[in-house]
Image (cartoon, rainbow, N blue to C red):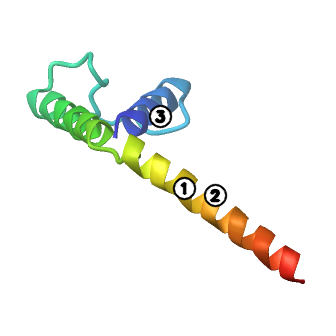
Amino acid sequence: MLFTQIAINIGMNLGLLPVTGIPAPLLSYGGSSLLSLFLAFGMLESIYQHRNVPSEASLLSNKALCRAKITLLQKVKNVL
């Protein structure tokens, strides 16, 4: 949403797009525009804070799984 507003405002200033009533992001006094922009920022911040970061326990279990696979492959190689 922010980048769309920026692109439209740049296009209007360059004369590539028709002049419309889109407010400049974080600069205009439009209450509903500012409210929707802050809501979008809040959602992005919430997504960033709740992203799935692997825990230490899962990383350790992945290492153990890789070691088990390697030893299994070595045993199969020795049998062949």
- SS label for mark 3: helix
Labelled pair 3, 1 in contact (Cβ < 8 Å) = no
Residue at 27 percent across and 36 percent down: it is: 49
Give the number of the disc on residue 27. Answer: none
Mark positioned earlier in the residue sequence (3 or 1): 3
Residue at 26 percent across and 19 percent down: it is: 26
Quarter of the figure with the C terminus? bottom right
| Quadrant housing residue 20 | top left
Q: Using the numbered discs, state the Cα–Cα distance from disc 3 to disc 1 in whole angstroms.
A: 50 Å
Where's residue 4, x and y in %? Answer: 41, 39
Identity of the amino acid at label 2? Arg
Q: Using the numbered discs, state the Cα–Cα distance from disc 2 to disc 1 in whole angstroms.
A: 5 Å
Vertical order, 59 against 45 (above or below): below
Q: Which residue is mark 3?
A: 7
Residue at 30 percent across and 25 percent down: it is: 25
Identity of the amino acid at label 3? Ala
Q: Which residue is mark 2?
A: 67
